[in-house]
Amino acid sequence: QVQVEESGGGLVQPGGSLRLSCTASGSNFRLLTMAWYRQFPGKEREFVAQFDWAGTSPTYARPVKGRFTLSRDGTKNTVHLQMNNLSPEDTAVYYCGVVIIGANTFWGQGTQVTVSS
C-alpha cells in the first residue's frame, strides 16, 4: 500500500505563483510515475504533468507547458509542481497520482487551487 500526501495550493491572484508538493510513502514499492492531474467542476480529471521515475525529463499538458515546472526529489519520493503565471482558468482541484510496479494508481486527497482577484 502506498500513501500519497499533497501540500500547497490555496488562493492566488492572476499572474501569481503557487507550488504544490506530493510525497509517496509506504513500504516495499518501486515507483513508475508520479503525476499531477486537475479537475474542473463538472468535468473529468485531466492530465497536467508527469515524471517517469526511470526517466530524466517530465512531460506536460499543452495548457501548462512553459508556465508549470515539475521537479523531483528521488531520495524522498517527492515531486514539486511550480505553477507560474496562473490564470483563473487554472482554478481546479489538483490531484497527485502515483503508479508503482504491479499496481494501479494511488491518489492523494486533492488540493484546491483558486486563481482570483
Image (cartoon, grey):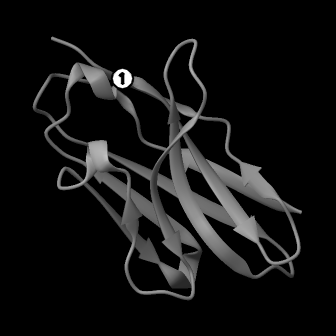
Is the residue 100 above or below the residue 117 in the image? below
Residue drawn at the location 41% of the way across and 86% of the way down: 56
Q: Is residue 103 left or right of residue 38?
A: right
Q: Residue furthest left?
A: 15
| Number of marks present in the image shown | 1
If the image is split into quadrants, where does the C terminus sit?
A: top left
Q: Specify the quadrant of the image occupied by residue 116.
A: top left
Residue drawn at the location 76% of the way across and 56% of the way down: 105
Which is more toward the observer, 96 or 45? 45
If the image is split into quadrants, where does the N terminus sit?
A: bottom right
Q: Amino acid at mark 1?
A: Thr
Q: Residue furthest front?
A: 62
Q: Position of residue 48 (x, y in %)?
A: 43, 48
Q: Position of residue 25 (x, y in %)?
A: 73, 66
State the residue position of label 1.
91
Q: Is residue 14 left or right of residue 11?
A: left
Residue drawn at the location 69% of the way across and 54% of the way down: 4
Is the residue 2 above or below the residue 91 in the image? below
Is the residue 1 above or below the residue 29 in the image? above
- Element at label 1: loop
Label 1 Cα crowd, 10 Å radius (few <14 / some 14-19 / many 20+): many
Is the residue 2 above or below the residue 10 in the image? below
Q: Is residue 70 left or right of residue 26?
A: left
Residue drawn at the location 53% of the way across and 14% of the way down: 41
Q: Position of residue 43 (x, y in %)?
A: 56, 20
